[in-house]
Image: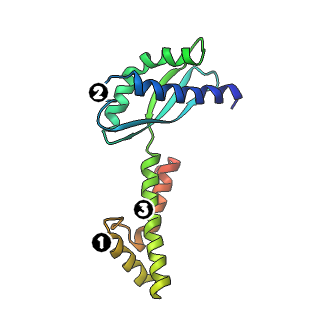
C-alpha cells in the first residue's frame, strides 16, 4: 500500500464520519441507533473505496441501504475535503467485528470465572466449569457458555472473523 493510498483512506474515514453525522438526513441512517465508520479500504488506483460501517441499536441492513442511497451525495464533499479531483466510488459494507469482540469478551469472562472457581474453592475442572456456568447464568452474563461448547464457539467466532466458510 502506498503512502498516498493510506492518507486517502484515513482522510475518507474522517470526512465520511463527519459528513454522515452532520449532513445525512435519511431516517434509515439517523435512526435511534449509532452508525460509525470502522475502516476504509481503497483499491490501488483510488477509484473505489470500500467503507466498513458498524451499526448499533438499529437494523444494519436498513442503515447500509440508507448509506448506499447517500453515496453520491457523500462522494463530492468528501473528495473536496481531501482535494481529490476524482473522488472514489463509495461502497458500504456492514462490519460486525465489534459484535464478535463482545461475544469473545463474554467467553473470556466465563473462562475467568471458571479459573477463579478452581483457584479459590479448589474444585476439579469439570466442577469448576459447572460452577462458572451457573454463576454466569445467575449474573445474567454468558449463561449459554459451557465447558463442552467453549472451544467450538471460539472456533466458530474465529472462522467468522477470518471469513472462512464452515
Earlier sequence position, callout 2 versus callout 1: 2
Q: Where residue 159 appears, x then y in whole percent?
A: 49, 53
Q: Which residue is mark 2?
A: 27
Left or right placement of residue 83 versus residue 94 in this view:
right
- The first of marks 3 and 2 along the sequence is 2
**Which numbered disc covers residue 138?**
1
Residue visible at 38% across and 71% down in the picture: 146
Image location of residue 75, percent across then percent down: 48, 18
Q: CA distance from mark 2 to mark 1?
A: 38 Å
Q: Quadrant of residue 53?
A: top left
Query: From this viewpoint, is residue 166 visible?
Result: no
Judged left or right of residue 124, residue 79 is: right
Spatial distance from mark 3 to mark 1, Cα to Cα? 14 Å
Residue 27 image position (x, y, % from top left): 29, 27
Q: Tag 2's secondary structure?
A: loop
User: Dividing the picture into quarters, in which one does residue 127 lie?
Assistant: bottom left
Query: 10 Å neighbourhood of mark 1: few (<14), some, or many (≥20)?
Result: few
Q: In this orientation, which residue lies closer to the viewer: 138 or 91?
A: 138
Amino acid at each position: 500500500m502506498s503512502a498516498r493510498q493510506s492518507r486517502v483512506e484515513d482522510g475518507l474515514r474522517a470526512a465520511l464520519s463527519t459528513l454522515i453525522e452532520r449532513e445525512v438526513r435519511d431516517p434509515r441512517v439517523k435512526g435511534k441507533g449509532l452508525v460509525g465508520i470502522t475502516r476504509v479500504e481503497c483499491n490501488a488506483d483510488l477509484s473505489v473505496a470500500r467503507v466498513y460501517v458498524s451499526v448499533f441499536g438499529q437494523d444494519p441492513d436498513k442503515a447500509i441501504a440508507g448509506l448506499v442511497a447517500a453515496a453520491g451525495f457523500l462522494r463530492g464533499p468528501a473528495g473536496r475535503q481531501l482535494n481529490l479531483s476524482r473522488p472514489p466510488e463509495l461502497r458500504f459494507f456492514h462490519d460486525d467485528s465489534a459484535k464478535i469482540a463482545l461475544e469473545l469478551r463474554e467467553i473470556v469472562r466465563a473462562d475467568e470465572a471458571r479459573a477463579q472457581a478452581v483457584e479459590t474453592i479448589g474444585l476439579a475442572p469439570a466442577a469448576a466449569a459447572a460452577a462458572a456456568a451457573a454463576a454466569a447464568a445467575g449474573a445474567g452474563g454468558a449463561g449459554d457458555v459451557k465447558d463442552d461448547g467453549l472451544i467450538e464457539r471460539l472456533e466458530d467466532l474465529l472462522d467468522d472473523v477470518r471469513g472462512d466458510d464452515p
